[in-house]
Image (cartoon, rainbow, N blue to C red):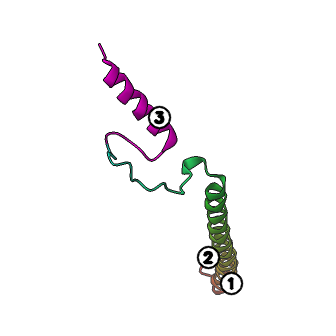
Amino acid sequence: MMTQKDCEEWAAMIAQMQDDPSWHPVYNKKGVRPMSNDKGPNDLEATIERLEFRNEKLHQHNEKIEQELIQLRLDNKKLAKQCKEQMQQFRNKGDM
């Protein structure tokens, strides 16, 4: 059972917690904890910045892959032409 003094202390503690959001009885007994400006995972501005960064990096990666693909196609055409020429030479020599 709580005494009158305990009830008053409890009411004062609740009033202080409602007035001061930085007060925490276990981790911050003095109530001197700076409030951070971090809005957490639901911060839309941070989410937008993160998604724009990912989008930019993915576009850069896609451009790199596209250039590699174009180069591989050119190399493939050159090799196909070389093979065709060598097969023609073998046919002319009578090896095939």
**Mark 1 against mark 2, which lies toward the viewer?**
1
Q: Return the residue nearer the eye: 34 or 31.
A: 31
**What is the distance, in whole Å, between disc 3 and disc 2 at their CAs?**
98 Å
N-term mark: 3 or 2: 3
Q: Which amino acid does label 3 sit on?
A: Ala
Q: What residue type is labelled 1?
A: Glu
- Residue at (31%, 40%) from the top-left corner? 26
Q: How crowded is mark 3: few (under 14 residues within 10 Å), some or many (20 or more)?
A: few
What percent of the width, then of the height, locates residue 56? 66, 68
- Highlighted range, magenta: 1-26
Report the residue marked by disc 3: 15
Secondary structure of residue under mark 1: helix
Secondary structure of residue under mark 3: helix
- Name the residue furthest top: 1
Circle count? 3
Q: In which quarter of the image is residue 34?
A: bottom left
- Residue at (67%, 63%) from the top-left corner? 52
Q: Return the residue nearer the eye: 93 or 49.
A: 49
- Residue at (53%, 55%) from the top-left corner? 38
N-term mark: 1 or 2: 1
Q: Magenta residues: mostly which secondary structure?
A: helix
Report the residue marked by disc 2: 96
**What is the distance, in whole Å, between disc 1 and disc 2 at their CAs?**
13 Å
Secondary structure of residue under mark 2: loop
- Residue at (47%, 34%) from the top-left corner? 15
**What is the distance, in whole Å, between disc 3 and disc 1 at their CAs?**
91 Å
N-term mark: 3 or 1: 3
Report the residue marked by disc 1: 85
Asked if residue 23 lies in the magenta stretch, the reply is: yes
Q: Return the residue nearer the eye: 62 or 8.
A: 8
Q: In which quarter of the image is residue 62?
A: bottom right
What percent of the width, then of the height, locates residue 60? 65, 72
